[in-house]
Image (cartoon, rainbow, N blue to C red):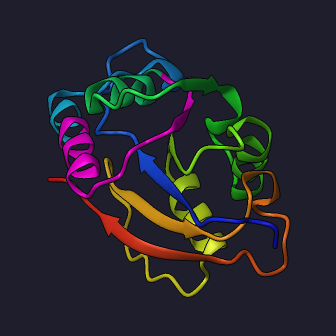
Amino acid sequence: MSAAAPRTLILLRHGKSDYPLGVDDHARPLNDRGDRQAALAGDWIRDDGHQIDAVLCSTATRTRLTLARTRIDAPAQFIDDIYGGTPRELFEVIRVHAPADASTLLMVGHFPGMPEAAFALDPSAEIDRFPTSAYAVLQIGTDWDRIGLDEDPDAALQALRIPR
């Protein structure tokens, strides 16, 4: 392990999406409930005292809209590999794109990637469900460029929040 200070990783699933006719999965927007969920998630993240330093977000329309509705004002990168990403692929995105000096990183993505990544980092985590707008807060004890590479990930689930 090489981290000097603990880091926080927040894995946020997008808000509830709509299913308009003729729109492919990647382009689906949020529905009204999803708009409300995403705004509430942003409020809760701030109320819990998390100050986001950087955001890695899927390029899907519903994740972009979720991020916008959270009103989280941090530098964001929109990355194709988050869409449909497995934990291994999501960790690679973090290793490549997370700023080394970011203390708190938010990733906005999809099911099942978000809960599977949380569980991969903390196999003792009890994650019964991870509905739309849910987010996991993990304490990470390694540098971003090492996440997912070490045998012992030195990570612990701190909270699983479901804004409703």
Magenta region: 38-60
Q: Residue at x 26, y 41 (%)?
A: 42
The residue sitting at the bottom extreme is 124
Q: Is residue 3 above or below residue 15?
A: below
Front residue (pair 12, 85): 12
Q: Is residue 93 above or below residue 130?
A: above
Q: Residue at x 28, y 33 (%)?
A: 70
Res. 40 image quadrant: top left
From the viewer's perspective, is 68 left or right of 44? Answer: right
From the viewer's perspective, is 70 left or right of 156? Answer: left
Q: Is residue 163 above or below residue 154?
A: above
From the viewer's perspective, is 24 left or right of 42? Answer: right
Question: Is residue 51 magenta-colored?
Answer: yes
Question: Is residue 110 magenta-colored?
Answer: no
The residue sitting at the front extreme is 4
**The N terminus appears in which quarter of the rendering?**
bottom right
Res. 159 image quadrant: bottom left
State the image coordinates of residue 136 (x, y, percent, origin top left).
42, 62
State the image coordinates of residue 94 (x, y, percent, origin top left).
70, 45
Q: Is residue 118 above or below residue 54?
A: below
Res. 162 image quadrant: bottom left
Q: Residue at x 61, y 35 (%)?
A: 83
Front residue (pair 97, 99): 99
